[in-house]
Image (cartoon, grey):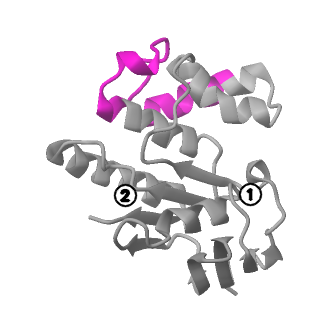
């Protein structure tokens, strides 16, 4: 049985705008899948459907054989890294990383320990008191990666995560994403037009 299975997934925004049509896809645990295509072809919409941020117009999503169409995003064990980082500008790096754990009502001591552990893994331990505006693009991307990693996801969703970085930084961050994928044991779906 596939770890993640999408059966005949469709997404319509109105009666004339069909973005995804009858997509079938299977993903195994630890697999790294890249979806390549031009802007506007439905790649990001598909990630938003898998994450639970959008509902499909039709079809079934199965995770470990269980239907997750109606499961809230916080209950899916999915870490998503967005193209624009999606960091809270008014929160410190520590609080940006702690946010998904606070939503799950994890105790403060466990949150502090987990944030420090993840910050060490991605090299952010010296930046925990800074706000996003005080970080470089690469540091912001590391915060976004760490926030996805902190929930110990079964699946990583990467939505064009490197498009805002220069070529040199993109190369090093690609290596970092692969390292995190390989060490986590999670499945990954990486969307890009590059």
Q: Which residue is mark 1?
A: 76
- The residue that appears at 68% across and 76% down in the rendered structure is 15
Mark 2 burial class by Cα count in 10 Å: few <14, some 14-19, many 20+: few
110 relative position to 134: left or right: right
Whether 114 is drawn above or below 40: the answer is above
Residue 133 visible somewhere in the drawing: yes
The residue depicted at 67 percent of the width and 70 percent of the height is: 14
Segment colored magenta:
112-139
Residue placed furthest toward the top: 129
Q: Is residue 126 visible?
A: no
Residue positioned most to the front: 16
> Horizontal and vertical percent for residue 26?
59, 83
Residue 13: x and y, percent? 65, 67
**Position above or below: 28 against 86:** below
Residue 178 badge = 2
Q: Nearer the viewer, residue 80 or 49?
A: 49
Q: Secondary structure at mark 2?
A: helix
Mark 1 lies on a secondary structure that is loop
Dot 1 crowding, Cα within 10 Å, few <14, some 14–19, many 20+: some
Residue 156, x across and y down, in percent: 54, 57
Q: Name the residue rendered at 64%, 25% in the picture.
A: 113
């Amino acid at each position: 049985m596939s770890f993640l299975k999408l059966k005949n997934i469709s997404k319509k925004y109105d009666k004339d705008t069909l973005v995804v049509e009858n997509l079938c896809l299977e993903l195994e645990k630890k697999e790294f899948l890249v979806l390549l295509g031009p802007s506007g072809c439905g790649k990001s919409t598909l990630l938003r459907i898998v994450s639970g941020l959008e509902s499909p117009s039709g079809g079934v999503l199965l995770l470990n054989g269980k239907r997750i169409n109606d499961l809230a995003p916080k209950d899916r064990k999915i870490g998503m890294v967005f193209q624009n980082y999606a960091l809270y500008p008014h929160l410190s790096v520590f609080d940006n990383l702690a946010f998904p754990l606070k939503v799950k009502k994890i105790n403060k001591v466990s949150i502090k320990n987990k944030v420090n552990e993840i910050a060490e893994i991605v090299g952010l331990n010296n930046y925990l008191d800074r706000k996003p505006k005080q970080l470089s693009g690469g540091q912001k991307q590391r915060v976004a990666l760490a926030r996805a990693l902190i929930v110990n996801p079964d699946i990583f969703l990467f939505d064009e995560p490197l498009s805002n970085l220069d070529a040199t930084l993109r190369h090093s961050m690609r290596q970092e994403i692969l390292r995190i994928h390989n060490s986590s044991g999670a499945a990954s779906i990486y969307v890009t037009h590059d």
